[in-house]
Image (cartoon, rainbow, N blue to C red):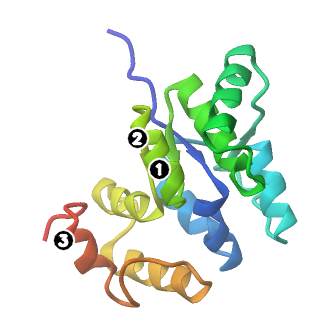
Amino acid sequence: MTAPTPRTFVWDASALHHAAAADRLDVLGTIVSSWRNVTTAAVLEELTGNGLSVVGQNWLEIVHVDGLTELVLLAQWVSVFSCADHNRGEATVLAWAEAHGATAITDDRDARIAARNEGLDVHGTLWIIAEGIRAGTLDRSCASGFVDTLIVTGARYPFGSGQFLTWAEKQGLLPP
């Protein structure tokens, strides 16, 4: 019997931005500590351009989208996003996710819709936080406080401060 392949998450800038802005990337790292986590060099460049950094996060590996399969997929994803400057990071994340069977993590609604339309496994930051609760790497009160911290940095969610747990339960992400 072979060991199961560990789950891999590939992170877009939108999902890392607010945790980096709040200096709480460590919380994300704790939530996903039992899985492989990568982001692309393009996302790193995008974050750096916004004055943020994920360098030195031992839970997050930086990958390049430069293999032949990855480059073909990148060209396809760039065409989906019409080469818009702000969608280049998403294109690299989705290309890498598709090439490696990974789950894309992005808070960009259009990217999630496009990815789902192509059959990719894609989720947002709130799903990851709920996943952490379900996996036992984050308790409910810490999760709620973490989401509130992200809101303070400008994260836009479909609820206000202190309402994450109620929202997640209504969405079926957490049991009541």
Comparing marks 1 and 3, which lies closer to the viewer?
1
Q: Residue at x 60, y 49 (%)?
A: 11
Gap in angstroms between the C-alphas marked 2 and 3: 21 Å
Q: Could you say which quadrant of the image residue 71 lies in?
A: top right
Q: Nearer the viewer, residue 81 or 33?
A: 81
Residue at 46%, 58% in the rendered image: 124
Q: Nearer the viewer, mark 2 or mark 3?
A: 2
Is residue 35 in view from this perspective? no
Q: Are marks 1 and 2 in contact (CB under 8 Å)?
A: yes
x and y percentages locating residue 5 in the rendered image = 44, 24
Front-most of residues 11 and 133: 11
Identify the amino acid type marked 1: Arg
Camera sees residue 168: yes
Element marked by disc 2 = helix
- Residue labelled with disc 1: 112
Farthest residue to the left: give it: 176
> Where does the N terminus fall, quadrant-wise?
top left
Q: Which mark is residue 170?
A: 3
Question: Looking at the image, is 129 positioned above or below residue 35?
Answer: below
Q: Residues within 10 Å of mark 2 (few under 14, many from 20)?
A: few
Label 1 to label 2: alpha-carbon separation: 6 Å
If the image is split into quadrants, where does the C terminus sit? Answer: bottom left
Crowdedness near tag 3: few (<14), some (14–19) or many (≥20) residues, C-alpha within 10 Å: few
- The residue that mark 2 highlights is 116
Amino acid identity at mark 2: Arg
| Position in image of residue 64 (x %, y %) | 78, 33
- Distance between the Cα atoms at labels 1 and 3? 20 Å
Q: Secondary structure under badge 3?
A: helix
Residue type highlighted by circle 3 = Lys
120 displayed left or right of 15: left
